[in-house]
Image (tube, grey):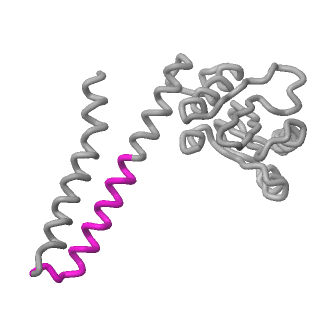
């Protein structure tokens, strides 16, 4: 299984190198004046880079889920889901601290990196997250003096939650978005 994973992560790199070599030959050739070939190769190059980054993101998510003991975030307990989100952030260089269950003032995770401080409210729900989670995160940002308040969920958000988040500056994310932070 490890061998297969390694091949999957090397394949996009090989394709990028091949595209760069072909791209270089076209640019160096005085005969190639066809702008269409240039555009197609550029688009192909961008597609390969996007594809490679997407594979890397999925691999990071899968690794964090397997560390949590499952391949499905809905099988986690709420506490395990918080740990799962903290692991993703930690793997991306954030210094993370999970708050206690009660008296956390609306923050499940406090993350710091390069002078930035985040408070994160984690909601592992099967239904849409409402305004209470946004209110809790906003309150936590004030209490912990954070630069950003975030709500992370396994599902979506109600329209009221989206409206409140927009007016308060709270970011509404999925746990998959944490990989890019």
- Of 88 and 112, which appears nearest the observer? 112
User: Is 72 situated left or right of 126 in this image?
Assistant: left
Considering every residue shown, the one lying at the far top of the view is 69
The percent coordinates of residue 110 (x first, y second) are: 74, 32
Q: Which residues are magenta?
A: 31-52
User: Is 177 situated left or right of 124 in this image?
Assistant: left
User: Is 59 situated left or right of 175 in this image?
Assistant: left
* Looking at the image, residue 41 lies above or below residue 80: below
User: Is 122 situated left or right of 17 in this image?
Assistant: right
Q: Quadrant of the N terminus?
A: top left
- Residue 22 figure quarter: bottom left
Q: Is-magenta flag for residue 91?
A: no
The percent coordinates of residue 166 (x first, y second) are: 79, 57
The percent coordinates of residue 60 (x first, y second) are: 47, 33
- Residue 5 figure quarter: top left
Q: Is-magenta flag for residue 51?
A: yes
Q: Residue at x 60, y 33 (%)?
A: 89
Q: Residue at x 72, y 37 (%)?
A: 127
- Residue 178 figure quarter: top right
| Count of marks overlaid on the render | 0
* Looking at the image, residue 158 lies above or below residue 175: below
Q: Residue at x 65, y 23 (%)?
A: 83
- Of 76 and 47, which appears nearest the observer? 47
Considering every residue shown, the one lying at the far front of the view is 115
Q: Specify the principal SS of the magenta part.
A: helix
Q: Residue at x 28, y 30 (%)?
A: 6
């Amino acid at each position: 299984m490890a061998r297969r994973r390694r091949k999957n992560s090397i394949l996009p790199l090989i394709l990028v190198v091949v595209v760069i070599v072909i791209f270089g030959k076209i640019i160096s050739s005085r005969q190639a004046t066809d702008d269409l070939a240039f555009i197609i190769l550029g688009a192909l190059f961008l597609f390969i880079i996007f594809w490679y980054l997407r594979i890397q993101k999925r691999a990071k998510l899968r690794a964090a889920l397997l560390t949590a003991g499952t391949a499905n975030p809905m099988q986690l307990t709420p506490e395990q889901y918080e740990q799962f989100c903290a692991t993703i952030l930690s793997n991306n260089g954030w210094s993370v601290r999970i708050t206690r269950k009660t008296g956390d003032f609306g923050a499940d995770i406090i993350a710091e990196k390069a002078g930035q401080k985040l408070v994160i409210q984690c909601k592992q729900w099967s239904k849409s997250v409402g305004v209470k989670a946004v209110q809790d995160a906003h309150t936590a940002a004030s209490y912990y003096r954070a630069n950003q308040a975030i709500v992370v969920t396994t599902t979506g958000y109600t329209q009221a939650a989206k409206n409140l988040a927009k007016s308060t500056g709270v970011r509404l994310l999925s746990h998959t978005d944490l990989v890019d932070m």
